[in-house]
Amino acid sequence: MVQITRAADLTVIGANGGGWVAPTGSSAPDSPLTQPLAPWAALGAISDDGLVYGFDEDSQEFTPWGLTSPFRTQITKSVRTFGLTLWETSRTTVQSIMYRIPEGDLEPDVDGITSFAETASPTPDRRAWWFVVLDGSTAKGFYVPQGEISDRSDVTFKQDEMSGYEITVTAYPDEAGNTVYHTDSVPATPVAPAS
């Protein structure tokens, strides 16, 4: 009889997590279990929708004459994205990434007022990103050395709804050609029973 091996501690529920941003060229934190230090700046509270790690791929199939199934497939596009909603819309780090403005330009004046203008001609705003997903003793870290917000949703201000910045970060290749680096802290996989 076949024995099915199952290990609940090898599953991941996004019970908690966070995000940080830093200038491009910033080194990844050592572990998803340690607090990122400067120059990493926290993104604050993220909505209960959590973090969505997206895969957008296209491929070209090659089917030889006389067959009805392809005998080769070539990946023609492979994009990684991270989607999340930032709830701390008054945090200067969050305003900086949402509006593509240097954080230093968001310092309040002597009366405590911050003012800025949105340009009709935005320039690229690549930054390094660090996302962590936590589930008990299991942790997953995603380091994006060069990423940029590629999609922003509308912002709603309503009495019975939390305002937030729903963003999508697209990961671009670094000098080594990599888009996302993974750092996981997971339990050891149990050995399957001998057959």
Image: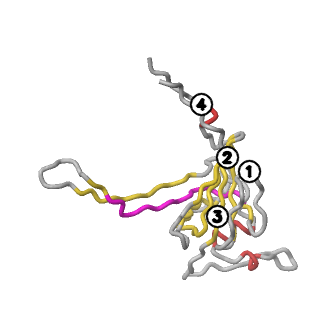
Front disc: 2 or 3: 2
- The percent position of residue 154, horizontal first and vertical second, equals 57, 62
| SS at circle 4 | loop
Identity, as a three-letter code, of the amino acid under mark 1 = Leu
Instruction: Magenta stretch: give its range.
Output: 74-88
| N-terminal-most mark, 3 or 4 | 4
Q: CA distance from mark 3 to mark 4?
A: 31 Å
| SS at circle 2 | strand
Identity, as a three-letter code, of the amino acid under mark 3 = Trp
Identity, as a three-letter code, of the amino acid under mark 4 = Ala
Give the class, few, some or many, for how many residues have Cα within 10 Å of label 4's Cα (few <14, many ≥20): few
| N-terminal-most mark, 4 or 1 | 4
- The answer, for residue 153, to whether it is visible in the render is no
Q: Is residue 143 left or right of residue 57?
A: right
Find the residue positioned furthest to the right.
110
Q: Which residue has dot 4 on it?
A: 7
Give the class, few, some or many, for how many residues have Cα within 10 Å of label 3's Cα (few <14, many ≥20): many
